[in-house]
Every structure is written in structure tokens, then in C-alpha cells.
Amino acid sequence: MRRWRGIIVPLAILVVAEIGFRVSIGASDSLAPPSRAMVALMSALGDGTLLANTARTLAGMLGGLAIGGAAGLAAGIAIGFSETLRRASFLTIELLRPIPSVALLPLSLLIFGFGYGMEIAVVAFATFWPALILTQNAVAQIEPRLIEVARLMGLSRLETAWKIVLPAAAPRLMTALRLSAGLALVVAVTAEIVSNPQGLGHDLMIAQETLRPERMFGVLFWVGLIGWGKNAALLRLERWLFSHRGEVDTSVAA
Amino acid sequence: MSTINRIPGPVMGVAGLALVILVWHLVTAGGFVSKAFLSSPAATWDALQRGLVSGELTGQLRATMLRMINGWLLASVVAIALGSVIGISQTARDFLRPTLAFLRSLPASAIIPIAISLVGLGPSMVLGVVVFGSVWPTLLATVQGFATIEPRLRDVAQVVHLSRAAFIWKIGLPNAVPDIIAGMRLSLTVALILSVIGEMLSGQEGLGTAILLAARAFRAPELYAGIAMLGLIGLVSSYGLLIAERRIVRWR
Amino acid sequence: MANSKAAFAFEGVNLELGGRPILEDISFSVGRGEFACVIGASGCGKTTLLRLLAGLLTPTSGTVRVGGEPVTTPSREVAVVFQDYSRALLPWRTATGNVSLALEAMDVPAAERPQRIAPLLAKVGLTDHAEKYPTQLSGGMQQRLQIARSLAQDPSVLLMDEPFGALDAMTRQSLQDEVLRIASERQATVLFVTHDLEEALYLGDRVIALYSNPGRIARMVEIPLPRPRSQLATREHPEFLRLRRELFTVMEEIHA
């Protein structure tokens, strides 16, 4: 019975919202009861518009994640293994890292115009930093005994990287990927809310501008669902890949 | 190779930065990138100075910072108060955990259309959005911090007949402080982001609006100067919190 | 067991690390097929001795030789078995995969590897566990796996750094006998580091006791006990008891 406790609150909120709306407001340009939001969501799914927008947002998110993540991974490995690089890059990284990705939206828009380019660029910038830092940490935490064993066996540097470093760091890299993916989605949607006229974020804004609150809330729920679902799926993948090692990190992105 | 290792870290860091700036200068000087997209280091520095001296940039900086900090402080108070009440009660946590997990995965910026819908595009909308969005990281961290109180301490509190409020204040809060501060750091990042977005959408004075206008007018130096200022806010706020955190944790 | 060409030798070796003397004037040689044990207090430098032989450290002065040649870098001639077996094995590979790593390092073609891995696993009694991951193996089995992997290198010298320190007494005893069997089958030269005097006497042809701070040779004793050794008979042998008494006093001096 205790398991069901978690469902009560959301259900209660929905019920109260539904009743409250019908009883007091009746009709509104800015609010909608959950029932209408669900209907709007279903019809948006049905006519394909929501899925099309979802695909666009995901494309922007994944494109940016691929670029930013790969660059961060490569840089993180290079810096993780080279003390010289680490000390030389420290100041530059600390100065560039705090720039909020939203600050780059106008610049990105200027360079790329509307479309995937600007969104991917900003997502890439945003995901580069966590990928870099988490990869650095992952490399630093590799069991030193394993590196020693590789040396004693006469493994070449490339062999050591491929057979020892990458598999050893893989669980933490997977966690880094999961956290970066969460960030990528948020940044992509944000880019669409502020400047890019495509995707789910734009859908939300248009729904608000055209005074269709039921669609707005429906899409909002959908966005939350996607974020939650993506995280759950990646977590499951992590467990499946690494459970035989006993090393799954279940920290969740804020 | 070992001589490089003997150069002190900070010097290496400055050298690395200097190298990056040099490359930046060469790229713009060589005309590889259009001046409209990338202003030279010199032009950016110039715009920075002009903006600060004339007070224009400083004014925008202040506006954004105030918005961010006010929203963040308000959000923190609400988040800690609410989070502590939820956190110490296993029952409350059970009831609310899935709801909080779902809300955690929502992009904070997604509430903006709703806020616009409800309140319009004024300054109160922006502040409201900042507060609403910044609440979550601190709220969740506070709940987490209170949830992990050593059970033995609860027994002690019961034996000594500590009231719930006193328990929160004397035992729960100190225990949760590291988590709360970590959450507040995240909240501050969110507050900055939402402030900037809010400005960009509503045209309220601040760095967000400034860089938007600069981009539209193809004035790259001002654009980069504005970005640099935002980066500065991010830098100062995160380091400031880090220092405050060390001070507070040192008492324990 | 003198040989014209010693399996390995320390010639006037000194080692300083961070300004502190760790090993001082270490000189001895071990012949081929000999089983040498090094005992001493914790931190006396016996592990450092082993690492010098492995090529992981270079002496401040003096020479370390393996097969007559000075040691400069790690070579496949020398294999090492560590005490912390769980950290020295790849948790993402099965037992077979772990042994395979040594063969891959030697550029053995993939087709040949299974037929070389199988007998090695059989030798340490892990045939039935070949497809298990290290986390699914007991401590003793993991250590045997590490031994199998070290043998895959086909080394001329086997270095073992307190390999049974983390295991329970029963497992320790059975592994001691296994190591003796493997060593005699391959005529391998072994340097075995331990803090356990009885283990050193049981296993070795020679025991080298080290002082601490810095590490210096305190005593070198030949162990003329009959082979093959037996857990019950050897440990009650009068010569065993005599040597134990003799070295016990040395150990007390060392620990003083």
C-alpha cells in the first residue's frame, strides 16, 4: 500500500485543479483544466504535430550533445593524462565555463540564423563543459594498479587507452553522458523558447501566444515526460551494461 | 620535459590563456571570420571599457545581478523552509517523491510561457519566473539533506522531548547544510539563466536585452562585451558561494 | 644452487625517494629455479625491492640485473602478482579475458589464444570458472586467476608481493602448495615477498630478512628442507623449527 502513496499527490492536484477550474473560472485564455490539456495532448499526438516537434527538438539536442560530448570527452582524456595540459588550460576553462549558454543565443542566431545550426551550436557549448570535467574526473579515478599492470605486460600506449582506460572509465563516462543529455534537452528547449522557431519550446510559446492554454499545458506535460523518460531509460541502460561490475552511480541531474 | 613541470601552475594557466587570446587575435586579424561574427580582442576590450565608463554596461550588469540575486534569495528561503518540512517526514517524502522527480526533469525555462500567460511580460513576471525556477534545486537538495539524518539523532531528539521546530533548527538544518549549499549553487545558476531569458523575452533592462539588441544591430564588440559580463557574473557568483560554503562548513 | 648466470641479481643497489633512503647497499643474487623469500617489517622496503626488479623503479646507484642484463624498463621476462588482486584484474573481462590480456600484449594471434589460455586456467584449477567475472569469484580464485595471467607471459622470473596476505588461512595454505607446484613444474625463479616468517620458511630455498629504515639485508639463510614440501610434515621438521627459532630473533630485532 505504501507504494501507492506517491501517486496520491499528483492525482489530488489534478483533481483539485480540474474541479477548481470548472467551478470558479469556467473559461480562460491563460489557464486550462487537466482534462482539456490531456485532450489537447492526445490530439497533438494524433495529428503528428507534436511528434514532429519532438523530433526536431531531439535532433537539436542530440546533434549538440554529439559534438559537445565528443569534444569534451576528447579534451577530458587529453587533459586527464597530461599534467602540462591541465595546468595550462585551467585558467581558460575556469573563465569560459561560467558563461551561461543562454548568453550565446543571440550570437548563435546571428551566425547561423534560425534552424538546427544555432540550436546545435548552443547545446554543444553547454554540454562541452560537463563532458570535459566529468571525463577528467573519470580518468583521474581509474585504478592505478591497472595502469601498472598494463605497463608490466608491455601494452603500448594505444592498447592501454583502448583496453584499459576506456573500459575502466566507461561507467563514469556513461553517467556523464546521462547528466549531459539532461542538460542538452533543457538547453535545446530553452533555445526554442527564446529564439528558435521550431521544436517543442516553440510549440509552447505559440500555444501561449495564440491563447491555447490547453495545448500549452499538454505540451508542458509532454516535455516533462520526455525528460523523465530519457533519464529513466539511460539509467536502465547503465545498470544493464555495468551491473556485473558492481559500479552503477545513480545520481540524478538536478 | 621536466622543466615544464617546474613552472608554477598559475603561470602555466596565464600562459595558456595568453595563447588562446593570441589565436583569437590572429583569427580576427587574418580575416578568417567575419567581423560581424567575431570581434577582435582589442575591439571587445574597447567596448567593455566604453560600456563600463559610460555607466551603460554597469547599469545593465546591476540590473541583471539584482534580478538574479533577489529571485535567488527569495527562492532559497521558500525552498529551505518547504524542503525542511518535507525532508524530515518520511511520510511526506513518500507522498511527494514521484512528483518532485517529475518536476525535476522539467526545463525551468518551460514555465515561461505559462508565466507570460498568467502575468504578462512585466518585471514581476521575470522575477516570478526566476523565483519559481530557482526553487527546485534548493528544494530537492534540502529534502535530500534532511532525509539523511542519522536515525540515532532522531532517537536522541525524542528522548530529550525536542519539539519538531527545534529538531529542524538544531539538528536537521546543520546536518543538511552541505546539501543545501550545493543546491543553492545550482539554483543560482538557474536564477542567472532565467533572469537573462526573462530579459530577452520581455525587453526589461539588463544584459540579456543588451546582447540581444547588439546582435540585431550587428555590433559584435558590444555583444561580446555583454557575454563577457554575463560570464563574469557566473564566475563571481560561483566562486563567491564556494568561499561562503567553506566559511560556513568550517564552523562544524 | 649457484649458477654461472644468475636468474636475477642486485649489485650494490641503493634507492632514495624524495630525499629519504629507502634501500641501502642491497647485494645478492638468485639462481635459476630458486625460490627466494624476502621478509621484513611493513615499510622496510621489501615491496620496493620487488618493484626495482620489475623495472617500475630505477636504483639511485647500483645495478639490478635479470638474466645478466641490467633492468631499465618492465619486460615480459618478469611477471608480477600483486596482493590487491581485485584491483589488478579487469572487472569487465571474464577469467578467460583476463588471461587473454597477457597474450594480447604479446601479440599472440586471436586464433591461438584459446588453446594457450585453457591449460593455464586448468593449471590453477579455474577451468569451470572460465566464463565468470572477477566479482563472481572468491578471493582465492581471483588470486589464482592473477597467477594464471602472470604465467601467460611465460616469464623467467615470477615476483609475488604478499600475494596471500588478504586471504584466509585455509586458502592461503592451498595456494602456497599450488605456487610451489607451478614453480617446480616450470623451473621458474621466484621472488616471494611476505611478512609471515613461517610462510617464507615453508616456501623458500632461501630467506632474506631486511632491516627497516633504510632497508638493508639483516640475514640471508639457506633453507635445506626436503622437497616437495608438505603443510604438515615440513612444518614439524626439526630443521624447520630450528630455522624458525633462529629467524624469530632476527625478526624481533627487525621490528625493534
Image: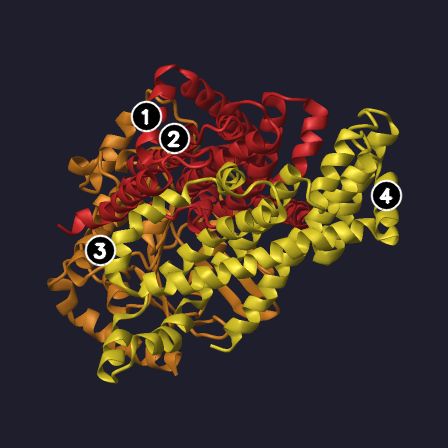
Q: Secondary structure at mark 2?
A: helix
Of residues B88 and A182, which is closer to you in this image? B88
Disc 3 versus disc 1: distance between alpha carbons? 74 Å
Q: Position of residue B101 (x, y in %)?
A: 35, 46
Disc 4 versus disc 2: distance between alpha carbons? 45 Å
Amino acid type of disc 4?
Answer: Ala
- Label 1 resides on the chain identified as A
Disc 4 versus disc 1: distance between alpha carbons? 52 Å
- Mark 4 near mark 1, Cβ–Cβ under 8 Å? no
Disc 3 versus disc 2: distance between alpha carbons? 69 Å
- Mark 2 near mark 1, Cβ–Cβ under 8 Å? yes
Tags 3 and 1 on a common chain: no
Report the disc number at residue B47.
4
Q: Secondary structure at mark 4?
A: helix
Select label 4 or label 2 by which is in front.
2
Q: Which residue bears the numbered disc 2?
A: A218
Q: Position of residue A54 (x, y in %)?
A: 44, 23
Q: Which residue bears the numbered disc 3?
A: C176
Q: From the viewer's perspective, is B170 left or right of C248?
A: right
In this view of the protein, can residue C148 be seen by the observer? no
